[in-house]
Amino acid sequence: MNTRIHYMYRDASNYKFRGSFLVRGRFDVESVRDFLFDGEFFVPHEVGIEHLLDMPMNEDDHYLHTIEGAEPSSDTDTRCDASSLVKRFELAHEKGWLSSLR
């Protein structure tokens, strides 16, 4: 069984963009909770996932996204395995989520 992870981008004007991606194996949002920026946010490109906002960005935009949930899926078009994704979150947290933007 694989896992579909749902994530969301919300800008300063409260416009929302949602997306999802699939990982091999079982993923639990709690497995990355301690690695999220302020316990809630992540920067998708730092873990190999697409930013949900079309570019160019304006004054209401930023890079932070949230994980909205995860559910089992029988789909097979996976991005990576669940344990690799957790490791990516851990590494991004260690180096600093916004470090690539400085």
Image (tube, rainbow, N blue to C red):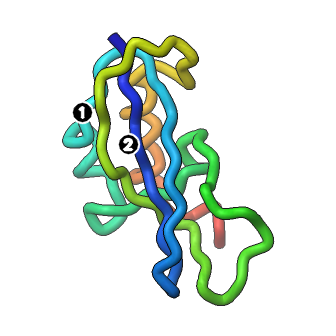
Local SS, label 1: loop
Relative side of 88 to 34, left or right: right
Q: In front of the other: label 1 or label 2? A: 1
The quarter in which the C terminus is drawn is bottom right
Local SS, label 2: helix
Residue 94 visible to the viewer: yes
Q: Which three-letter amino acid code belongs to the residue tagged 2? A: Glu
Point out residue 55 in the picture as x, y percentages from the top left corner. Answer: 77, 66
Mark 2 Cα-neighbour bin, 10 Å: few <14, some 14–19, many ≥20: many
Q: In the picture, residue 74 is in which quadrant?
A: top left
Q: CA distance from mark 1 to mark 2?
A: 14 Å
The quarter in which the N terminus is drawn is top left
Answer above or below: position of 76 versus 30: above
**Residue in the picture at 26% in, 41% down:** 29
Answer above or below: position of 69 versus 81: below
Residue 96 visible to the viewer: no
Answer above or below: position of 87 versus 1: below
Mark 1 Cα-neighbour bin, 10 Å: few <14, some 14–19, many ≥20: some
Point out residue 81 in the picture as x, y percentages from the top left corner. Answer: 45, 19
Point out residue 31 in the picture as x, y percentages from the top left corner. Answer: 24, 37
| Residue at mark 2 | 90
Name which of mark 1 and mark 2 comes first in the sequence.
1
Closer-to-camera residue (78/43): 78
| Residue at mark 1 | 28
Q: In the picture, residue 27 is in which quadrant?
A: top left
* Mark number displayed over residue 98: none
**Residue in the picture at 61% in, 50% down:** 45
Q: In the picture, residue 6 is in which quadrant?
A: top left
